[in-house]
Amino acid sequence: RANRFVLSWRLASALGAAREGSLGAAVDVHHNTVSLETVEGRPVFLHRKGAAPAHPGARTRGGGSPGAPAWVVRGRGPAETLRSVAHGAGRRIVRSEAISRLRPKYTRRSLERTALGGRVLCEDTGLLYEEHPDAYKPIDPVVDALVARGTATRVASLVPLFTVKL
């Protein structure tokens, strides 16, 4: 969490937008974690794999790939979902296949800019191919399903200006 805060503050500073309290509206959501929660009235360690917390009223995100919009959603927190939502749409092709299939189609330089005008900051060329939008399913059907099921409500669609991959 501290790393994400420092990265966010440095980016806001570079953009001239860093002011005291300016990151208060940030949505800091991590996934694939273990947290101590209460389930059916008792404390348990809840492992969210491929999921993000979505407690009632809390903002969370349904991620897109670096070149696709992401959604900020507000959790509705039904107990049967363990107050969780899918953190993304999932991969269309596995990482190793993404590299072999996409390398002939795209140059490294082209991977550093998205179709939406954003920049992808990443030193690992293989990771750039692995995380390319073509490697992922679209997020909108997932968000539609979360809303239809009553798990979350839409807050905003965001187009990433910068994506940092480490």
Image (cartoon, helix red, strand yellow):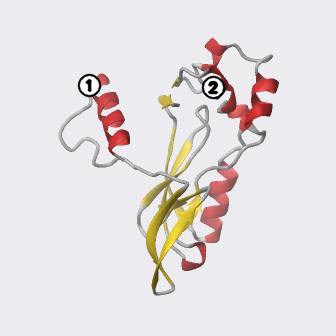
The amino acid type found where label 2 is placed reads: Leu
Q: Is residue 105 above or below residue 57?
A: above
Res. 55 in view? no
Other-residue count near label 1 (Cα within 10 Å), few / some / many at <14 / 14–19 / ≥20: few
Q: Secondary structure at mark 1?
A: loop
Other-residue count near label 2 (Cα within 10 Å), few / some / many at <14 / 14–19 / ≥20: many
Farthest residue to the bottom: give it: 41
- Front residue of this view, candidates 38 and 159: 38
Name the residue at 30% across, 23% down. Answer: 14
The amino acid type found where label 1 is placed reads: Gly
Q: Position of 148 compared to 84: left or right?
A: right
- Front residue of this view, candidates 71 and 48: 48
Give the residue number, with chain letter if any, for mark 2: 128
Res. 106 in view? yes
- The spot of residue 11 in percent (x, y) is 34, 29
Give the residue number, with chain letter if any, for mark 1: 16
Q: Is residue 68 above or below residue 107?
A: below
Q: Secondary structure at mark 2?
A: helix
- The spot of residue 12 in percent (x, y) is 31, 31
Q: CA distance from mark 1 to mark 2?
A: 28 Å
Name the residue at 51% across, 31% down. Answer: 166
Q: Is residue 58 above or below residue 124?
A: below
Name the residue at 60% across, 58% down. Answer: 49
- The spot of residue 42 in percent (x, y) is 46, 85
